[in-house]
Structures are given as structure tokens and as C-alpha cells.
Image (spheres, helix red, strand yellow):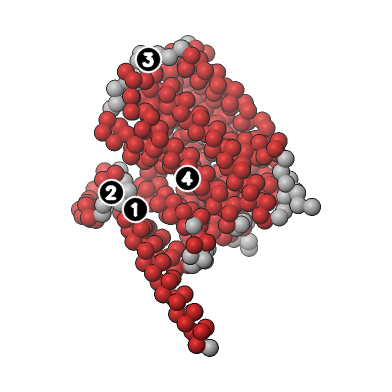
Amino acid sequence: MTKKLTFKETIFVASMLFGMFFGAGNLIFPVSMGQMAGSHIWQAAAGFLITGVGLPLLGVAALGISRESGLLGLGSRVGRGYGVFFTCALYLTIGPFFAIPRCASVSYTVGMEGILSGKGHPLFLAAFSFIFFAAVLFFALRPGQIMTWIGKVLNPLFLVFLAVLVIRALTAPMGGVGEAVPSGSYAEGAFATGLLEGYNTMDALAGLAFGIVVIDVIRGLGVTEPGEVAKSTVRAGIFSSILMAVIYVLVSVMGTQSTGELEVSSNGGEALARIAESYFGGGGAFILAVIVTVACLKTAVGLITSCGEAFAEMFPGGPSYHVWAVIFAVGSFLVANLGLDAIIAYSLPVLMFLYPLAIVLVLLTLAGRWFGNDPTVLRWALGLTGAAALFDGLGALPAATRSLLHLDGLTAAVLGFLPLSGQGFGWVCPALLGVAVGLVLYVIRRGEKKKAGGER
């Protein structure tokens, strides 16, 4: 008889997945969006939910439906070389280069600085990040217990403290949503800006990366039949996505309402700190420190676990999982001490390049049965997508870096030619062209094969 997850087991797996997803950016970006979007919050939230919730769910679903063991297998449908390149680029981005260090930096900047004196000294960040990554490594070196640590311990703790802040804010609002004035790009293009803001969570990339952890956990619970593993993965993804969507909306509305008494903050971390202080006084700093640190801790554990398992699988003759976990923890510690501003500034260009590749790969995987998962379609689509996304990424580099590399003229010329590039979606038309060319070649080749078969 085929083993299936019980409802309770599905909820625990979904809690683990949510816990891995919901970390640094998932708190600071929605509240900042809420403050800036003002009365346009519903349009902005709709865009944010597409890229912040919908795409991660599709990524998890794509891995489940494809019945691949992880991102390497999914990417290798294009070709082994592309599979290795894309897997390395994605895991390093959500791993030691950006997302994992950001977890420590956000925990310190948003959570701990409010309760520390002498907070500006770099030694404080170094000491905190050392302790943070020591704790992360403790959990990550026990991957078989990840569902217990994240799904049953850290995630419920995080939700309890977050609920205290959100419920207090929503039951005693500082202002009305309809009275809040939109600012910046939210004044004219709230939906498109919300879409791009969802990129910053990195969750669409994480959805592809976390698949290997979810699949391993489901198999560890005794579900081995590939079809049932796929169904269980998708079900867990749906439950976790619903919870994420609810929290995103509540936190965004909390941010919008806060502008009734507070000025728009320069970033989401500052906004959260000021909101917590307004409602709880000095105790608000402690509540926020617990919320942010636990949120970032569980996400960092999930990321290091995913990265370690992926690299151990990708390079079977290389270091073991435990060695990779130590390497990623040490590397993340070093990058975290560059500071939050530097991490965010250079993560955006990389995300502008990788996100389109992830989106197209996920959508074509889900639609793969219509063209037999033909590599030609994937290669044309991803090739043209990558070429256009590269210029989106170069255009998003900090101005000083673009000037140093003399990229302004080139990026302006290319992006000026591509439709939708002004909104950050210059890759869409090349992607559609690549899909069209690939499908035409697929149909022609299939017709030739049928003709050759008939002649024989």
C-alpha cells in the first residue's frame, strides 16, 4: 500500500517550508511597501503576492511535478552545463553571497541595534554574526531534524511573537488606509512596483532551492512513490503559500496604517522598529528582536541545509554535506560583516538576472507536457531570456559601479530598445520570442520524424 502523508504531517512539512521561506526580506519589504504605497496598497500587494507568493509556489510545484530530485535535475533538462551553472548561481545567490549574510545583517540592524548601546561599532556586528552563524550551523549539521527544529519549534515561536505585534497594530490603527498618500513609484505604478518588490524576498529562487529539502523530508516520513511525493510537495507548498500571503497582507496594511502618525521610513527595518516602539515602548525593541532574529535564523538554517545538500549532490567526489555546511556558514559570516547596505545594493542586479531565468524555467517545466519537455524549446527561451536579463541586471548596478565599468551607454541603448525595460521587465518579449522559435523548431522536427517513420 502506498504511504501518504497524514494531514498532521502535511501541516508540519508546510510549517517547515514556510519557516524556511519567511525570513529577512519577508518582514522588511512588505512593511516598507505598505508605507510607500499608501492608499494604493491593494494594487501593490497584488503585484507583490504574484512574485512573493505565486512564483515560489510554482517553483515548489514545478520540482514536485517534474519528479526531479532537485534543481540540478531540473536545470539539466536544458543541458548538463546549464544545469550546473544555473544551480551554482542560484544557490550561491540565496546562499553565502547574499541571502544568508542578509539574515544575520537584518537580525542585527533591525532586531539587536535597538537594544544595544554602542551599536555603531563594527565589533558588535562581528560578535553578533559569529553567534548567529554558530547557532545556524548547530541546526544545519543535523539535517535529519530540520522539520523538528524549524517546523515544530522555531516557526511557532516566530508566529506567536509576530502575532503580538500585528494584532496590536491592526486593532489600534494609527491611521486609515484610504487616507495614506502614495509616494515614489507607487504613486503611478503601484502594481508593477509591487511585482519588482517581490523579487527582493528571493523566494522564487528559494522555492526551487528548498524543493530538495522538502522532498527529502517527505521521503524520510515514509512516502517513496514518486507520484505521491509530488502531490505531498505541492500540498505543502499550497499551505505554506496561503500562510505567507495572509501575513504579507497584514504586515503591509500595518505599514500603511502607521503613516497616520509616523513618517515614511527610509527602509522596512526602521519602519518596523518605530512601529514596535510606538505600540510597546521599550518592550517593542525586545519583541522585534525576537521576531526578526528567529525569522532570520530559521531561514538561514534552511538555506545552508539546501546549499549543502545541493553541492554535495552536484559534486559527489568533493566535500561531504557537513563540510559544505561549514564552508557556507564561514563564507556567510564574512560577507555579513560588509554591512546590510552593501549586500542589498549588489543583490538587486543579480536578482534582475536570475529571476527571469527562474520564472521561465518554472513555467516551461509546468507546461512541459505540451512540447514533450523538448530541450530546444528550453534552450531558445532561456537563451534569449538570459541575454535580455543580463542587461536588466547591469542596469541595476549601483551608479558608481556602472560608471567605473563604462556601462551606462551600452545598457541605455539595449534597454531603450527592449519593450517593458522601463518597468524592469525587458526580458519578457525576448522570452516569448525564444519560446515561439523553439516551438516552431520542435513542430518541424516532430513532423520530419513522423514523415521519416511513415516512409519506412
Q: Position of residue 180 (x, y in %)?
A: 32, 20
Q: Amino acid at mark 1?
A: Val
Which one is earlier in the sequence, the residue at label 4 or at label 1? 4
Secondary structure type for disc 4:
helix
- Please tell me whether mark 2 sits on a helix, a strand or a loop: loop
Question: What is the distance, in whole Å, between disc 4 and disc 3 at their CAs?
Answer: 32 Å
- Label 1 Cα crowd, 10 Å radius (few <14 / some 14-19 / many 20+): many
Rendered residue at 41%/66% (across/down): 439
Helix, strand or loop at disc 1?
Answer: helix
Image x and y of residue 111, in percent: 49, 25
At which x and y percent is residue 198?
Answer: 42, 39
Q: CA distance from mark 4 to mark 1?
A: 15 Å
* Residue marked by disc 3: 175
Q: Are marks 4 and 1 in contact (CB under 8 Å)?
A: no
Residue 364: assigned label: none
Q: Which mark is residue 55?
A: 4
Crowd band around label 2 with a 10 angstrom C-alpha radius: few (<14), some (14–19), many (20+): some
Q: Quadrant of residue 52?
A: top left
Residue 107 % position (x, y): 50, 30
Q: Earlier in the sequence, mark 2 or mark 4?
A: 4
Residue at 63% x, 31% y: name it: 154
Residue for badge 2: 420
- Sequence-wise, which precedes: disc 4 or disc 3? 4
Amino acid on which the number 3 mark rests in the picture: Gly
CB contact under 8 Å: marks 2 and 1: yes
